[in-house]
Image (cartoon, helix red, strand yellow):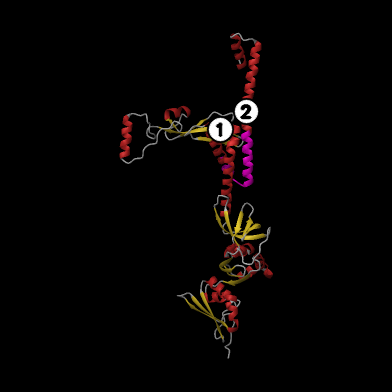
Amino acid sequence: MDSQGCESFILNQYGINNLAIKQLNNLIHMARKKVAEEKEEQGTRLGEFGSAIMQIAEEKGIPKAVVIETIEAALSAAYKKDYGKRGQRIHAKFSEVAGDAKFFLIKDVVDETLREFVEGEEGEDEEIDEELIEGEEKLPRYNPERDILLDEAKKLKKDAKIGDVIEIELEPQSEYGRVAAQTAKQVIIQRIREAERDSMFAEYKGKEGEVVSGAVQRIEGRNVYIDLGKSIGVLFPSEQVQGENLRMGQRVKVYLYKVESDPKGPGITLSRTHPDMVRKLFELEVPEIFTGTVEIKSIAREAGSRTKIAVYSNEEGIDPIGSCVGQKGTRVQAIIEELAGEKIDIIEWNEKSEKYIAAAISPAKVVSVALNEDRKEAKVSVPEDQLSLAIGKQGQNVRLAAKLTGWKIDVIGVATQKNTEIEKNDTESEEVEAAE
């Protein structure tokens, strides 16, 4: 006999006629239908809610695991608020496929060795006092909302043992679909934002020390804000090239100087004055530098005006200066244009300090270099007619040469050239006759 036949038999036994039975069956059918509709509606709400969140996460580039964890945490908090008890640990398991959630009460399997039972015998209290005297930590009290005894745990899980965690599935709440969508919405949105910030921070932190492209989004006071795609970076006045006027919407390359965590998103400090920006631009433009065939040994820069860069070839037959300049100067010219016309001197690094310093003083020609190794000072002699060229405007050339080489350089002009002129590289030398 099926369930409906059974119901009819029982009702007939109590003298209820067929019409009453039919009406009652209709009521039962309607009640079942309503429960099914409410359950379906709950699943639909959560399903639509979960789908929307997953779509947002995909657009923001947030890992799916982070999104699921966020949804479960928010649903757990909302469920506990409306249906839970104080001290309970409630965990939600969200099904992306089904679009619904199940809820579990989490309890630790314990015994008297792990918890203090207040209603215990006096001997237990004396034992606890004795343990405290010996300096041991007091056991936490047994909490029926968070703890479960081993015998009870085995009724739920046969192989349960002390220290296990038991998950007890909770009864579904018909109204929870609506409650979850309302209560959990703000929590989830907030956590999605936090996850988005963390994701962006990790992404840009990994790009720290790189050159990136962006567009000028806005200018506030002296600060210039650059749209980097997923986030906004700022060029403070100290990191801007003096005299360079950036315009709204202008595409520009910037050095990603520093990335810090901030409640509003990753705090990204950009620079166009950092010496390493020149290094990175050369890596982008010169394949030999990118692959390591040609190495940048040192850079000295006064942004917006002039840069000196020392390069060295790790392979015979490769001209480091020629590689950086490019055919008809195309490579270095592209960098100069990106730096708004900043002059760039490319010299060849040499392990012999005299030759390295002589090259760093270029474009002036050097007669001799006298070194004081202990004080790391160099006295550089140049022809008198090239003294101003060696020093440079407002001392810029010799100042950059000193930064580049790490030597303190003193330049003097000489009326005669009694020594062999030191050329800028090892391949060429020129004899200079003594002037009468």
Q: Which residue is mark 1?
A: 102
* Residue 303 position by quadrant: bottom right
Q: Which residues are magenta?
A: 45-68
Q: Quadrant of the C terminus?
A: bottom right
Determine the CA span between mark 2 and mark 1: 16 Å
Question: In x, y percent, where is residue 212?
Answer: 62, 58
In the rendered view, tell whether residue 231 sits above or below residue 27: below
Question: In x, y percent, where is residue 385?
Answer: 60, 83
- Magenta stretch, overall SS: helix
Q: Is residue 426 visible?
A: no
Q: Nearer the viewer, residue 371 or 100?
A: 100
Q: Is residue 132 visible?
A: yes
Secondary structure under the numbered disc 2 in the rendered image: helix
Question: In x, y percent, where is residue 418?
Answer: 55, 86
> Could you tell me which residue is drawn at 33 percent across and 31 percent down?
124
Q: Residues within 10 Å of mark 2 (few under 14, many from 20)?
A: some
Find residue 38 and name its label: 2
Question: In x, y percent, where is residue 205?
Answer: 56, 54
Tell me the amino acid under the disc marked 1.
Answer: Lys
- Left of 383 or right of it: where is 140? left
